[in-house]
Structures are given as C-alpha cells and as structure tokens.
Image (spheres, coloured by chain):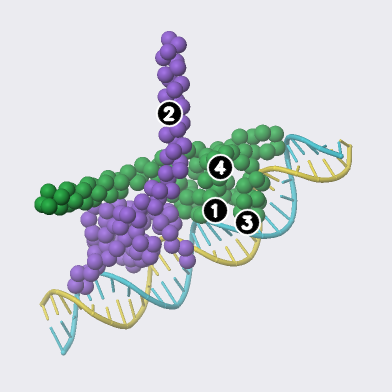
Chain colours: A purple, B green, C cyan, D yellow
Amino acid sequence: MRRDVFQAIADPTRRAIITFIALQAMTPNALAEHFDTSRQAVSKHLKILTECELVEQTHQGREIYYQLNVNKMKEVDKWLEQFRKIWEKRFNQLDNVLANLKNKK
Amino acid sequence: MRRDVFQAIADPTRRAIITFIALQAMTPNALAEHFDTSRQAVSKHLKILTECELVEQTHQGREIYYQLNVNKMKEVDKWLEQFRKIWEKRFNQLDNVLANLKNKK
DNA sequence: AATTTGCGCAACCAAAAAGTTGCACTTATA
DNA sequence: TATAAGTGCAACTTTTTGGTTGCGCAAATT
C-alpha cells in the first residue's frame, strides 16, 4: 500500500477534507456532515491522510479532532520547485521580448 | 474517467516522466528506456498526461516528441497557495517568539 | 446500570487504474 | 517495393481504490 502525499491529495474528497481542517481541527462526524458520503468513508480518508502524516489527531474524551500537518504539504511545494524555476525563466524571457519591442519602438 | 492534474501526478512513474520531459522533449521509446516498464505502459501514462493537458506533442516524421506544459503545473501551485499562507503565518509567529526572547534578554 | 454516542476496524463489493499482449497504421530504410 | 521502426489503440487481466455494512469498544448521558 503506497502512502505518499501525492497519492493522498489525488482524491477530491480528501482535498476538501484537508481544506476544511486547515482552518480548524474537526471530528470525523463534524466533517462527514459536509459531504455526501458516510461517516465511515470520511474516516477511511482520514486514516489514509493520517498514515501519510498529512493529518494529526488530538484525543478529547471520546472525540478525536483531526488537524492539518501543514509542514507535510511542503513536500508537494518542494517537488513543484523544479517547475517553478522553469516558468519563472520563461516569464523572464517574455519580459526580455517585451523590453526589446519597447526599445525598437 | 477523472483526468485532473492531481490524479496525474499521483503516480510515481508519471512524476518521473514529467521530470524527464521538463528538461527536454522526448519520444515514448526514449522515455521507456529509463523505466522498468514496457513501452506501451509509458505510452499509456503519456496519454493520461496528454488528456489532462500536462503534456503536449510535437510530431516529427514518425516520431512524436512529448514536452511539458509547465503552465498546467501552476494549478497545483495555486491549490497550495492556501496552505502556503498558513505556514508563512506560523513562521512569522515563530519569528515573533524569537524576537520577544531577544528583547527579554 | 442501561443506553446512546463517537469512533475504529475488518470484511466485502463495485469501479477504476495500471500493466500486458496483439494488431494496425504510418514513416523511414534497404 | 519489401522490411523495419515508432506509435497509438483496443481487449484483457490484475491490483488498487473508494464505498458500504456490520461489528466492537470506550466515553458520555439517562
């Protein structure tokens, strides 16, 4: 069973869950109210998110609050870095083109 | 069949393909040499990447060169934006803590 | 103490995804 | 013109995934 951040954020429901709990920690039940699926389905998503460490638990009595481990999200950001370099480079090249056009005017 | 960027980058082989062709356009055969899987498997990944517009084709005789559409990658970057705000905020808070410690010294 | 509530876990099912095989089509090459 | 090389596509198989159902357990509530 592969459990990495990229696989975790591939599912749209999980992305929505992540966005929810990024704002504030929530219990599975509270989360499930926002979705069409069952509590168990949400729980399963939370398990996957927990296993890849995108999400952490805080026990409070019989309730379990899930919150985002925002640091883990940086792994995606880090992977994007290589492409960010490319599009910034392209942007600068475009910039040069525009500057040349201006000079020729 | 869901075809979005997040689903596309979920597969490690596809991420590797993306990294390869980010540097230079390549044919399916050339790409397949770098992986353990068959030429057809790579072709299938390329099809998926093409369908979600992460990758574009350039025909050259009987060869087809695939190159990265780096702009599409910005969709992931855009989604990350909401979390980037959070971790920058946390970083600033840490900054304040450090500043306070310094003042009390 | 009995019942309800919040939760995780395991078994099962259907749908989707990843890979393989075989074939057809087009462009080079001998 | 016959053959080889580079590809895509469709059919089939296996694995993975997302969802449901049914359970058990611990913490609240009555």
Position of residue B2 relative to residue A43, above or below, is above
In the picture, measured across the screen, residue A28 lies left or right of residue A76, that is left
**Dots 3 and 2 on the same chain:** no
Q: Is residue B58 above or below residue C1?
A: above
Of the numbered discs 4 and 3, the one sitting upstream in the chain is 4
Q: Gap between marks 3 and 2, in whole Å?
A: 38 Å
Q: Where is residue B13 in the image (x, y as percent from the top left)?
A: 54, 53
Q: Which residue is drawn at 28% across and 49% down?
A: B87
- On residue A92, which mark appears? 2
Instruction: Work out whether disc 4 and disc 3 sit on a shared chain.
Output: yes
Q: Mark 3 lies on which chain?
A: B
* Res B21 label: 4
Instruction: Check disc 1 and give the amino acid type.
Output: Thr
Residue at 52% over, 46% down? B19
In three-dimensional space, the C-alpha distance between marks 4 and 3, rounded to whole angstroms, equals 17 Å
What's the residue type where badge 3 is placed? Thr
Do the numbered discs 1 and 2 sit on residues whose CB atoms are within 8 Å? no
Badge 4: few (under 14), some or many (20 or more) residues near its Cα, within 10 Å?
Answer: some
Q: Are marks 3 and 2 in contact (CB under 8 Å)?
A: no
Whole-angstrom CA distance, mark 4 to mark 2, is 21 Å
Q: Name the residue under label 1.
A: B13
Q: Which chain contains the residue that carries disc 4?
A: B
Chain letter of the residue carrying label 2 = A
Whether residue A36 is visible here, answered yes or no, is: no
Secondary element at image label 4: helix
The answer for how far apart the CA atoms under marks 3 and 1 are is: 9 Å
Residue visible at 17% across and 52% down in the picture: B97
Q: How far apart are marks 1 and 2 (CA)?
A: 31 Å
Earlier-in-chain disc, 3 versus 1 = 1
Q: Determine the secondary structure under disc 3.
A: loop
Residue A39 shows up from this direction: yes
